[in-house]
Image: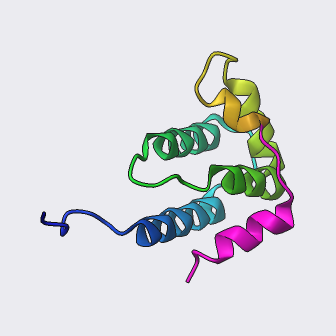
Amino acid sequence: MNRTNFVEPLEAKRTIVRDFFSLIETLPNKDDAASVQKLLRYLQSLLRIKQVIPPVVEIMTIVKTNKPILYHSARRSIVASSNLHMLFQIEMDVELAHERLAQYDK
């Protein structure tokens, strides 16, 4: 079996975490439609990843803590039947979230 087309799980998670931190630095903590849509599109893309389980709980915790206005605007903009609805229901200790993501940010 030729494994050259497959990315190693650890490298895939590192890429996810790098992309997340890049996004979170550029997104303003505002409730404007463009920022909310960009965040929601990013979250949708996380849910589509099949090769690894992305650190969604940690990501949502950091968004909630670092960009509260954006987080709550995005949360209000989705309907209860949306597949994103469940992401806005999860909670975690922010210190633990940073610790877990730090292991991939190398």
Question: Is residue 104 part of the magenta span, yes or no?
Answer: yes
Residue 15 visible from this viewpoint = yes
The image shows residue 78, relative to residue 94, as above or below, that is above
The image shows residue 65, relative to residue 96, as above or below, that is above
Magenta region: which residues? 90-106
**Residue 82 shown left or right of residue 89 in the figure:** left
Quarter of the image containing the N terminus? bottom left
Q: Residue at x 55, y 84 (%)?
A: 106
- Counting from the top left corner in percent of width and height, residue 80 is at 70, 17
Q: Residue at x 64, y 65 (%)?
A: 25
Q: Nearer the viewer, residue 29 or 18?
A: 18
The image shows a total of numbered marks equal to 0
Q: Nearer the viewer, residue 3 or 45?
A: 3
Q: Residue at x 80, y 37 (%)?
A: 72
Residue 28 visible from this viewpoint = no
The image shows residue 88, relative to residue 101, as above or below, that is above
- Counting from the top left corner in percent of width and height, residue 48 is at 43, 40
Q: Residue furthest front?
A: 1
- Counting from the top left corner in percent of width and height, residue 56 is at 63, 50
